[in-house]
Amino acid sequence: MKYWNEIQKDAFSYFGFFSKEKARLLINTIPNLSVFSINGLLTSGGKVFLEKCAYDISQIFQRNDLSKLKFYLFVNIELDDNSSRIEKYKKVWKLLQPKWQLDEFIKGPEVEIKLGEKIFYSSVAQFSVNNFLTALEIVASNPQRNTIIATNKNDMLTEKLITHLFNLSFYSSLGSDYSKIDYFNLSLNRGIEDIIFRWGNSSEEAELALIFNENMFNIFQSLF
């Protein structure tokens, strides 16, 4: 399997869907965001690449500059049947628990949010870098709805913050596709103080991209 890393000081040059014009419309400024990514050709299957990403992240975040950041898994479940008692009982964590071992995750409240006629349960769980592989597997199982955030904030497990993250991810005044996380809007609003993880893959390639404040660029550049 072939792996490589990429780094770009200007996230607006890295992602085609990042627009400086739209940034001005949304937040009245253009934040200085950078990107570091781990990439792989999936010749040996996706599981190998997930393990590679988890190992690399564990090594990177042992650095003193990053070791104080905490990891959070952000999960959003859409109900298939709005009247289903079983789905409303399982919400987020009871739905995921049979497939993944989540006992070491510190789980926040499961917030019910209505988006048009759709009902979602949204939640955040804190986890250690030792459980990054499990969290990344959950993200990769539905990257349009799940992601990881690294931050030193202490309010991530509150209902208010979870609702705020959901609104940033699925609402946009510029008409985003509500079926998937709006990484552009999320990064504009949270990327200056947090690190946003974005998983993307095709049948042949996969990428784990980290979006962060340009002030941290030299930390990631030193990895090369």
Image (spheres, rainbow, N blue to C red):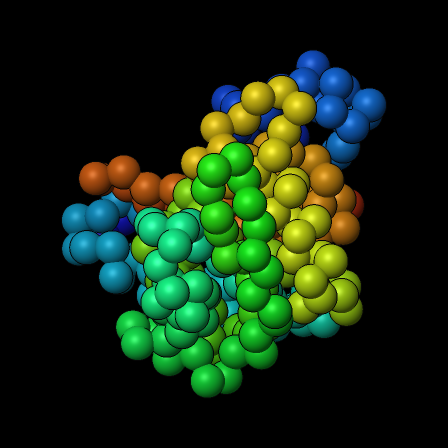
Residue 20 visible in the current orientation: no
The structure residue drawn at horizontal position 17% and vertical position 49%, both measured from the top left corner, is 43
Q: Position of residue 59 (x, y in %)?
A: 52, 69
Given residues 67 and 3, the one toward you in this image is 67
Q: From what the image shows, is residue 119 above or below residue 131?
A: above
Q: Position of residue 41 (x, y in %)?
A: 26, 44
Q: From what the image shows, is residue 30 above or below residue 70?
A: above
Given residues 91 and 123, the one toward you in this image is 91
The structure residue drawn at horizontal position 27% and vertical position 48%, both measured from the top left corner, is 2
The structure residue drawn at horizontal position 47% and vertical position 38%, both measured from the top left corner, is 117
Asked where in the image residue 61 lies, by quadrant, the reply is bottom right
Q: From what the image shows, is residue 14 above or below residue 224?
A: above
Q: Position of residue 188 (x, y in %)?
A: 70, 35
Q: From what the image shows, is residue 99 above or below residue 104?
A: above
Q: Residue furthest right?
A: 28
Query: Left or right of 55: which side holds 30?
Result: right
Given residues 117 and 134, the one toward you in this image is 117
Q: Position of residue 127 (x, y in %)?
A: 55, 74
The structure residue drawn at horizontal position 50% and vertical position 22%, both measured from the top left corner, is 16
Q: Residue furthest bottom?
A: 103
